[in-house]
């Protein structure tokens, strides 16, 4: 018993040790932009949605309804603002219905903010053009940061006179600053401008690039203006256009409205300024334009465990521990069989006790009736002769006589006397009569083969 207990404690301690080692490993983040409402990854929206639900004054919620479904309920939607995001394209030449639905909602009074990386498929329809300077390389950024510890910054300038916010510049990581757009129509109101650094372009194979000056933000996290290029103010990442009763907003820096952005002071302030444009009404964020991913589908428990490295190792080690337990404890351990005493037959004592009880009570008739009842039950069950029905005596009594060897006349007299006694309300039988009747019943009972 002690050996088994020690083995179990060892396995439990070993599993806890392995679990602690797996959990304490640095978390590996998925840097894909997904905007998923239940994703805690940097570019998911779990923290972002929780923050907005607390700070938006008129309410904020997430829905999975698509834009066409929302446009059908245009009266209710006119009292709401809509935020729609995608890591691909919300509106494109392949899905003009979405753009029509958006414009319908805007004309009726909704403010709709479209957040996507580029608008190359609908540039002509929106009178915008992607800047040739816009270039982002997530893989290159990660590689350079690991190898050299360098980070590259662009400047986003909030410059929107009608807004309640003052003009301010934000030094934003190059990866988060979005694609710059050239506005070719005066219908668009520019809200956030973008400026680039002179060392923005580089060749991955050019080692001389790393010898250039590194961009240093000031104490407030804003970029120093002496390194800025003189860009045209038409180069924007956030703008709006009046359409009917509402405004259509376009944001080409989708990473600003994610978990990563909302947890950093510099970008969090800019994200809150952007969301403030939708704060005059309850805001609805729709996830219908997000691509379907596997982790949104219903999966089995084993599939979920296999997708989580700590759980997978715990599962494997548990199976190994069970296997070892079977190997070392599969042999049956024979225990000593105790000597069981031979059971004592108490039937004679029971019969004597019952007989004494009846003798003391002097109820001779009751003993005869119970004995007669047992006789009728055995005859009915074993030889299928029912003597409780007088109308069947002509058939049943001759059968019983031939079976037991009794004379038919004597058998009829015995059965008749028992039936008379059975019909009496208060039967009385003397000791001699009881002895005679019981002898006849026992003889019949014992003569049944």
Image (spheres, rainbow, N blue to C red):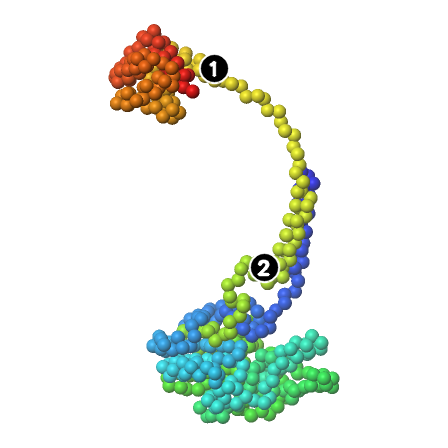
Q: Which mark is residue 349?
A: 1
Viewed as shown, does residue 400 lie left or right of 238?
A: left
Q: Which mark is residue 305?
A: 2
Question: What residue is at 36 percent from the left and 81 percent from the top?
Answer: 108
Locate residue 82: give its quadrant.
bottom left
Sequence order check, earlier mark of 2 and 1: 2
User: Label 2 vs label 1: CA separation?
Assistant: 68 Å
Please name the residue shown 63% across and 85% down the image.
Answer: 224
Quarter where residue 431 is shown: top left
For the C terminus, give its image quadrant.
Answer: top left
Residue 124 at what x, y percent from top left?
48, 90
Apparent side of residue 56 relative to residue 316 in the rendered image (left or right): left
Neighbours of disc 2 within 10 Å: few (<14), some (14-19), many (20+) = some
Question: Residue 375, how many percent across, how many down?
Answer: 37, 19
214 left or right of 222? right
| Neighbourhood count class around disc 1 (C-alpha, 10 Å): few under 14, some 14–19, many 20 upward | few
Residue 188, given in percent of the width and then of the height, sits at 46, 89
Is disc 1 placed on a helix, strand or loop?
helix
Q: Position of residue 346 (x, y in %)?
A: 49, 18
Q: Nearer the viewer, residue 380 or 263?
A: 380
Q: Is residue 80 above or below residue 343?
A: below
Q: Which mark is residue 34?
A: none
Q: Secondary structure at mark 2?
A: helix
């Amino acid at each position: 018993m002690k050996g088994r207990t020690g083995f179990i404690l060892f396995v439990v301690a070993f599993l806890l040790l392995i679990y602690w080692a797996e959990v304490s490993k640095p978390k590996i983040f998925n840097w894909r932009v997904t905007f998923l409402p239940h994703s805690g990854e940097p570019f998911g929206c779990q923290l972002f949605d929780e923050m907005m639900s607390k700070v938006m004054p008129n309410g904020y919620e997430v829905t999975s309804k698509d834009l066409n479904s929302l446009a059908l309920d245009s009266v209710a939607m006119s009292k709401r603002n809509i935020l729609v995001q995608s890591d691909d394209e919300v509106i494109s030449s392949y899905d003009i219905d979405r753009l029509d639905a958006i414009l319908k909602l805007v004309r009726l009074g909704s403010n709709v903010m479209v957040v996507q990386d580029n608008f190359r498929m609908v540039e002509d329809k929106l009178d915008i053009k992607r800047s040739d300077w816009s270039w982002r390389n997530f893989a290159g950024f990660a590689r350079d940061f690991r190898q050299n510890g360098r980070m590259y910054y662009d400047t986003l300038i909030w410059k929107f006179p009608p807004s309640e916010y003052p003009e301010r510049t934000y030094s934003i990581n190059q990866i988060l600053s979005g694609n710059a757009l050239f506005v070719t129509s005066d219908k668009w109101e520019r809200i956030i401008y973008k400026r680039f650094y002179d060392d923005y372009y580089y060749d991955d194979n050019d080692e001389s690039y790393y010898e250039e000056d590194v961009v240093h933000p000031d104490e407030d996290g804003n970029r120093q203006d002496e390194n800025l290029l003189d860009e045209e103010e038409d180069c924007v990442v956030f703008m709006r256009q009046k359409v009917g009763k509402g405004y259509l907003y376009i944001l080409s820096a989708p990473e600003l409205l994610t978990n990563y952005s909302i947890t950093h002071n510099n970008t969090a302030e800019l994200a809150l300024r952007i969301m403030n444009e939708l704060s005059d009404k309850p805001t609805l964020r729709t996830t219908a334009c997000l691509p379907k991913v596997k982790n949104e589908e219903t999966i089995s428990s084993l599939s979920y465990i296999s997708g989580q490295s700590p759980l997978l190792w715990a599962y494997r080690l548990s199976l190994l521990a069970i296997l070892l337990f079977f190997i070392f404890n599969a042999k049956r351990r024979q225990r000593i069989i105790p000597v069981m005493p031979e059971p004592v037959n108490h039937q004679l004592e029971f019969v004597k006790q019952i007989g004494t009880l009846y003798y003391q009570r002097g109820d001779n008739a009751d003993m005869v009736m119970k004995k007669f009842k047992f006789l009728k039950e055995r005859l009915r069950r074993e030889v299928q002769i029912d003597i409780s029905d007088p109308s069947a005596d002509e058939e049943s009594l001759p059968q019983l006589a031939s079976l037991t060897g009794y004379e038919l006349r004597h058998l009829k007299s015995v059965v008749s006397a028992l039936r008379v006694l059975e019909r009496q309300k208060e039967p009385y039988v003397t000791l001699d009569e009881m002895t005679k009747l019981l002898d006849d019943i026992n003889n019949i009972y014992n003569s049944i083969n």
